[in-house]
Image (tube, helix red, strand yellow):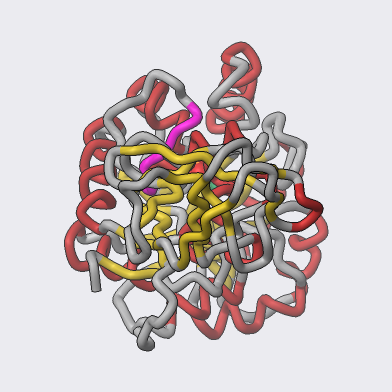
């Protein structure tokens, strides 16, 4: 890692990755977990997360969204398989074949390219059971893929999968999707060796009730979060940290920041934090809290591109460490509620400008 000067960084706790992975492995019983490390492992740094799971938990299969992401993992030179989940273009198939990646057959458009190819291609077939994003809906089309692949030695269907739209919300709709997928499995000419349907919420709530699965795709809960409110056994992996760069004293009536949206009502200490919306610390954080030690302090005035103001007391000094979110009182879920989104987006939006620091190094 390059030297860090500004003390604003994302501290990634790999022990918490292990904790989450082990707990979720217990919950998923006989299925193997496929860590989803797209979007730079939801902002945590895919290289480090993959290496950690490879060396400490013997994980050998990872899922990404893009060919670029698969190539980046390949460059780690580990003995791993990489499943690309996103919708590829026909022009990407030659690289996929050359690199021996597993891709997702997302529908008829890509299938037309695959049929024209003479290259060795390995894929998992995606079934659209109700998300209406990617995958085949039509049973006869799916059977045609199986029959065609059987007659063409260059094509290997390794797996079949679907994705749930409402694993965290509408159980009836979830059951409907699950029913469609189960029905399809029964009519396939052969059963592929990899069957996977669950994401984090589905692993936590339903994986043990789906004995036909061989694998499950684990995303957000690997990183310590869940859309299930009652889940309390996960540990957040990322602490977004900054420090107090300056302290300004405002007189009563003095105004602060762009558009002077804040006015001091008494003599007030304002700490200036070197973090802003260019770091993914968005303007909607105005009005929320940050923590310094065990105390919480309010974010006042507009969040700037590189700076944030908080109102502090006499106990706060320049150089003090400030936690924006992570383990403790203010999590990515707190920020998600504050900024009207979900933990996924809060984690992913921590920008590239913020160095990731692993286990304190
Ligand atoms: C196809 C697919 N599978 C699995 C996941 C992981 O989902 P989660 O992060 O909810 O575990 C995602 C994430 O968006 C996905 O797109």
> Which residue is drawn at the image coordinates 19% and 67% (left, top)?
55
Q: Is residue 175 visible?
A: yes
Image coords of residue 200 (percent x, y): 44, 36
Quadrant where the N terminus is found in the figure: bottom left
Task: Please give the range of residues in magenta.
Answer: 222-227
Identity of the residue furthest to the left in this view? 56
Which quarter is ligand 1 in?
top right
Image coords of residue 167 (percent x, y): 55, 26
> Which residue is drawn at the image coordinates 40% and 37% (left, top)?
296
As for residue 224 lying within the magenta part, the answer is yes
> Which residue is drawn at the image coordinates 76% and 73% (left, top)?
90
The correct choice, above or below, for 226 with respect to 123 in the image is: above
As for residue 303 lying within the magenta part, the answer is no
Image coords of residue 282 (percent x, y): 65, 53
Query: What secondary structure characterizes most of the magenta part?
Result: loop
Image check: 341 left or right of 99? right
Q: Quadrant of residue 123?
A: bottom right
Image check: 170 left or right of 204? right
> Which residue is drawn at the image coordinates 52% and 79% (left, top)?
71
Image coords of residue 48 (percent x, y): 33, 70
Q: Is residue 45 visible?
A: no
* Tally of numbered tags: 0
Which one is in front, 74 or 9?
A: 9
The correct choice, above or below, for 238 with respect to 8 in the image is: above
Image check: 149 left or right of 359? right
Which one is in front, 167 or 30?
A: 167
The correct choice, above or below, for 10 with respect to 288 in the image is: below
């Amino acid at each position: 890692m390059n030297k860090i000067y500004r003390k604003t960084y994302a501290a990634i706790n790999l022990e918490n990755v292990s904790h989450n992975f082990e707990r979720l492995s217990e919950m998923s019983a006989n299925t193997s977990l496929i860590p989803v490390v797209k979007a730079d492992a939801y902002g945590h740094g895919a290289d480090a997360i993959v290496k950690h799971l490879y060396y400490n938990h013997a994980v050998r299969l990872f899922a990404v969204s893009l060919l670029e992401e698969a190539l980046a993992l390949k460059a780690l030179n580990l003995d791993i398989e990489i499943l690309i989940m996103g919708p590829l273009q026909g022009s990407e198939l030659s690289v996929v074949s050359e690199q021996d990646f597993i891709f997702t057959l997302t529908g008829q458009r890509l299938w037309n390219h695959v049929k024209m190819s003479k290259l060795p291609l390995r894929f998992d077939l995606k079934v659209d059971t109700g998300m209406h994003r990617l995958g085949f809906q039509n049973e006869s089309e799916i059977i045609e893929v199986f029959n065609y692949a059987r007659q063409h030695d260059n094509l290997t269907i390794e797996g079949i999968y679907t994705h749930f739209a409402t694993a965290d919300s509408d159980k009836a709709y979830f059951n409907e999707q699950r029913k469609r997928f189960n029905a399809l499995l029964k009519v396939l000419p052969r059963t592929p060796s990899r069957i996977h349907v669950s994401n984090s919420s589905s692993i936590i709530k339903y994986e043990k009730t789906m004995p036909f699965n061989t694998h499950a795709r684990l995303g957000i809960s690997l990183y310590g979060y869940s859309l299930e409110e009652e889940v309390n056994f996960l540990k957040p992996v990322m602490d977004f940290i900054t420090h107090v760069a300056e302290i300004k004293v405002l007189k009563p009536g003095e105004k602060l920041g762009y558009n002077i949206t804040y006015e001091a009502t008494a003599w007030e200490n304002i700490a200036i934090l070197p973090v802003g919306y260019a770091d993914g610390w968005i303007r909607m954080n105005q009005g929320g809290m940050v923590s310094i030690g065990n105390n919480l302090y309010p974010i006042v005035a507009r969040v700037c591109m590189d700076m944030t103001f908080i109102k502090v007391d006499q106990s706060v000094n320049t150089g003090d460490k400030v936690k924006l979110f992570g383990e403790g009182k203010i999590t990515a879920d707190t920020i998600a509620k504050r900024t009207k989104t979900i933990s996924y987006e809060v984690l992913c939006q921590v920008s590239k400008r913020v160095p990731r620091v692993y286990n304190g190094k």
